[in-house]
Amino acid sequence: MRSNAVCIECNGMAAEVDWIKTFLPAGDKNLPFQSVSLFKSMSTRALLVIVEHGLQCNNRPSTTPKQLLVGVTSAYRYDGDEFDETVAQSEASTLHQEIHGKAFNNEEVIRILSTRSQAQLNATFNIYKDIYGHSITKGFPGGDYFSTLRTVIRCIRDPKKYFAKVLRLAINMEETNEDALSRVIVTRAEKDLKDIKELYLKRNNISVDEAVAREWSGDYKTFILALLGADQN
């Protein structure tokens, strides 16, 4: 069964992190996220406060997932297309050593992911694949930190592709996921939802509108189709 997902955005980069709710105290798990409009209006700082509050209440032994989230969502990033190939080569090697080495240093990984532009990081990921023969996310160890790291990297590489996948999972799994569907559509509506819908159609041979109309009914269906801009006549 899929867990509910939370989207965190900052400076145009998005990461869907499935496990954030696990950091919240048991009685608070649904409070911040019951309303889609509330979720949409929450600032990055507010979301980070929720995560940190949950970490403190649950006394989790490892803070590296939190550190990764804080770094990625709070950094100021250059938005241009330029990148330095020499830096990309050096940091591809650094990432490989830090992720797969015996003495894992999450600080270097977080530094690279939280300070480099999307163009620079994509250049690093491409060079990583050229050097080591596989994508950077292949062969990650288990655990919350690496699960989060994998998601962050996938979102950096191609946010639209990732959100199209989230929509597919939300719609097509045996137990449809209204939370994930609503959050993607609401949070991307004024950004790149049109592109995400086109990618969904290309990969699934059915439009998001048609898939929603097929799987849902009633007020929720009407609400989602209205957000999608579908003609319901």
Image (spheres, rainbow, N blue to C red):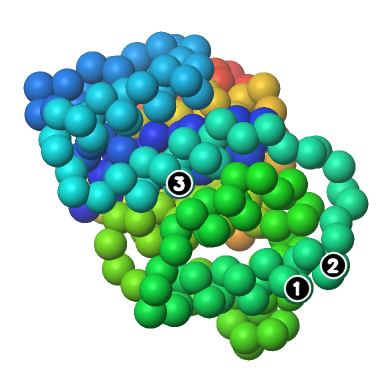
Residue at horizontal 50 percent and vertical 23 percent from the top: 44
- List x then y, in percent, for residue 216: 36, 33
Residue at horizontal 45 percent and vertical 46 percent from the top: 68
Give how far apart the Cα atoms at labels 3 and 1 are.
22 Å
Residue at horizontal 14 percent and vertical 38 percent from the top: 59
Q: Which residue is mark 1?
A: 89
Give how far apart the Cα atoms at labels 3 and 2 are.
24 Å
Q: Quadrant of residue 19?
A: top left
**Sequence-first tag of 3 and 2:** 3
Residue occupying the far left of the picture: 27
The amino acid type of the residue labelled 1 equals Gln
Q: Is residue 199 visible?
A: no
In what element is the residue under mark 1?
helix
Residue 137 position (above or below residue 5): below
Q: Are marks 2 and 1 in contact (CB under 8 Å)?
A: yes
Residue 28 position (above or below residue 136): above
Q: Which residue is mark 3?
A: 68
Residue 197 position (above or below residue 223): below
Q: Is residue 148 visible?
A: yes
Tell me, for residue 85, which label it has, or none. 2
In what element is the residue under mark 3?
helix
Residue 193 position (above or below residue 175): above
Q: Are marks 3 and 1 in contact (CB under 8 Å)?
A: no
Looking at this view, is 48 or 188 the one in front? 48
In what element is the residue under mark 2?
helix
Residue at horizontal 40 percent and vertical 27 percent from the top: 48
Q: Is residue 222 left or right of residue 84?
A: left
Tell me, for residue 54, which label it has, or none. none
- List x then y, in percent, for residue 93: 64, 76
- List x then y, in percent, for residue 72: 55, 41
